[in-house]
Amino acid sequence: MAGRSSISFVTGDGLVALQGPKVAIVDVRDGERDLDGHIAGSVHFASARFKEKLPELLQKIKGKETVVFHCAKSQVRGPICARILRDHLNTTSVNEGLMDKAPKVVVLERGFDGWAMAGRPVCSCAGMVCNKK
């Protein structure tokens, strides 16, 4: 089954090249987002409540071609949440007509920590949705 395949990763440079209106960046860190900042334009869906917030995320990613997940290092929470979304999309949303086409689901290699350590821009605005691009 396609839903059982491994998750693909995108490098920080790859994300920079991808960023735009057809890409959603999903930050699944829990409290760290408030302390460390976040990638501009990202939405926050904490891993601790990810499954219960999935319907809300589905609305946010409607019309997106790619959904990029990350946590602090993208070793545990980011990949787990990416698989949850991917499996859900493979079994439910597209089949029930909630989306025309399932977006590609990937994980940011090295996560937010790698992004920030590479000197890429970090935003510190408050809120679940960052409106800065």
Image (spheres, rainbow, N blue to C red):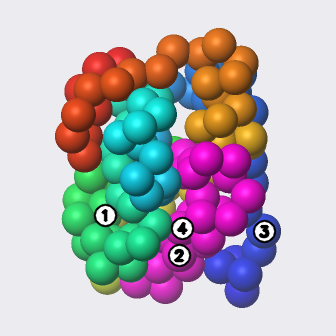
Residue 21 in picture, x, y percent from top left: 36, 29
The crowding category of the residue bearing disc 4, from other C-alpha atoms within 10 Å (few below 14, some 14 to 19, many at least 20), is many
Q: Amino acid at mark 4?
A: Cys
Residue wearing tag 4: 81
Per the image, the residue denoted by label 3 is: 6
| Residue at horizontal 71 percent and vertical 18 percent from the top | 118
Mark sitting earlier along the chain (1/3): 3
Question: SS of the residue at dot 2?
Answer: helix
Please provide percent x and percent y for residue 54: 33, 72
Q: Which residue is mark 2?
A: 84
* Mark 1 / mark 2, whichever is N-terminal: 1
Q: Quadrant of the C terminus?
A: top left
- Residue extent of the magenta highlight: 68-94
* Residue 133 visible in rendering: yes
Residue lying furthest right: 6
Residues at discs 2 and 4 in contact (Cβ within 8 Å): yes
